[in-house]
Amino acid sequence: MPKTPRSSPPVSQSQSDEDEPLDRPPTPTPAPKPASAETPKPTVVKSSSSAGKKPLPKWLWMAVAGAAVLIVAGVVGWKIFGGTSSPTVNSNPAADAANEILVARLLDGVPVLAEKSNSNIYAIVIENIVESRPPSALDKASVVYETLAEGGITRFLTLYPVGDSISQIGPVRSARPYFISWAEEYKPLFVHAGGSPQAIDYLRSGKANVYDFNQFSHGGNFIRDDTRPAPHNLYTDSDKLFMGLRRTAPDATPTYTSWTFKDEAPIDARPTTVNDVVIDFSSFNYKVTYAYDRVQNRYQRLVAEKPHLTRENNQIYAKDVVVEFAKIGLVAGDKQRLDIQTVGSGKLLLFRDGTVTEGTWKKDSPTARTQFLDTGGNPLALNPGPIWIEVVPTDRKVTY
């Protein structure tokens, strides 16, 4: 029979008082006078001029009292509304923050306060099989990598800056070596639930440039949502992950290099007619479409030709869509697991501001930052905001 959680006993008034901080000494209580001591009577002195005079009428006393009240109110009002030379205290923290200088966040170029510009990262594997939809917090990710897992199903590696408050993230699923390779660029808290044999072996080797956070070893930082079928019901949140980061890597320091960011194109420079970007990963259920919104200068994401919504009913958008063409095959000796190229270089398409730019992606090592380069080898600048990186097979067609 399950145990009933015990609640804390109620705090009595005396306990509550004792728990108050002693930020000032108590006021001393005057010692009582001895009973034999006689309290002196006050001396009353009568003015000789008042003798024989009648007391003032009651109406006159009321008039004098009213005048006194008006005088006091006037003095107080003068003090409050301009009669004081004391400096005005701004009690609105939001106004103070609004006046602070914002800088581009290294992860996604979004303007933030300087102390938040170079945060640690949560890299979380989230599934996309039909039974797991809709996802939670996919719209809040700064960077999302999408590529194939097994059987034509796609899966996500999502990146969130530490410090953002998110109540539910998931469903969390298992790792693959290529997800680890992309995550290694940031040395993040790498969050997953198990993984392929190749992924687990690499994580256990200690060579991966991540802080491994496997649900199998950190179950207390995850929850199972009984309203959804297993195994598509594993979730976490920013508070649980922060506690996990403090315990797993208390000295974690971000060292990743930022991509290049630019100002958005003004609306007059944006095209009025833009074709949808369509990526056929495999079957219809994993057909991805990005529809350009000229006014907002962003791309609405659709899956299976329907708006891609989160569990919270939020539409998912991207400011930049990067398509990387990579070699994808089977792991040697494994008839199911995919081997996806992450190191090396390949063709790239960058969609932003309603335009498309051809170029090259390049990654020199598992820990090296992926570079997005134009045809001349120069870095391509991204718009600040959510960045979606679609890694597709070299033989797959992307229409736009």
Image (cartoon, rainbow, N blue to C red):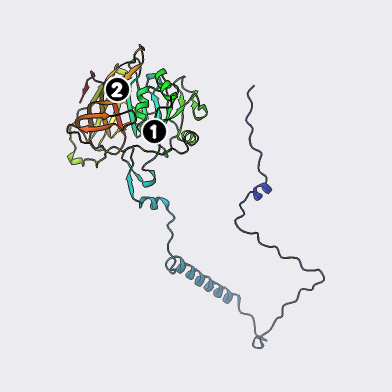
For image coordinates 46% across by 22% down, the residue present is 228
Looking at the image, is mark 1 or mark 2 earlier in the sequence? 1
Residue 372: horizontal and vertical position, in percent?
25, 32
Q: How many discs mark residues in the rendered view?
A: 2
Quadrant occupied by the N terminus: top right
The foreground one among 307 and 181 is 181
Looking at the rendered structure, the kind of residue marked 1 is Lys
Q: Is residue 207 left or right of residue 10?
A: left
Most distant residue in the right direction? 36
Q: Is residue 156 visible?
A: no
Q: Are marks 1 and 2 in contact (CB under 8 Å)?
A: no
Q: Quadrant of residue 350?
A: top left
Q: Quadrant of residue 290?
A: top left
Helix, strand or loop at mark 1: loop
Label 1 environment density (alpha carbons within 10 Å; few <14, some 14–19, many ≥20)? many
Residue 76: horizontal and vertical position, in percent?
49, 68
The foreground one among 339 and 64 is 339
Looking at the rendered structure, the kind of residue marked 2 is Gln
The alpha-carbon separation of the residues under discs 1 and 2 comes to 19 Å
Res 341 label: 2
Q: Pointer 1: what residue?
A: 187
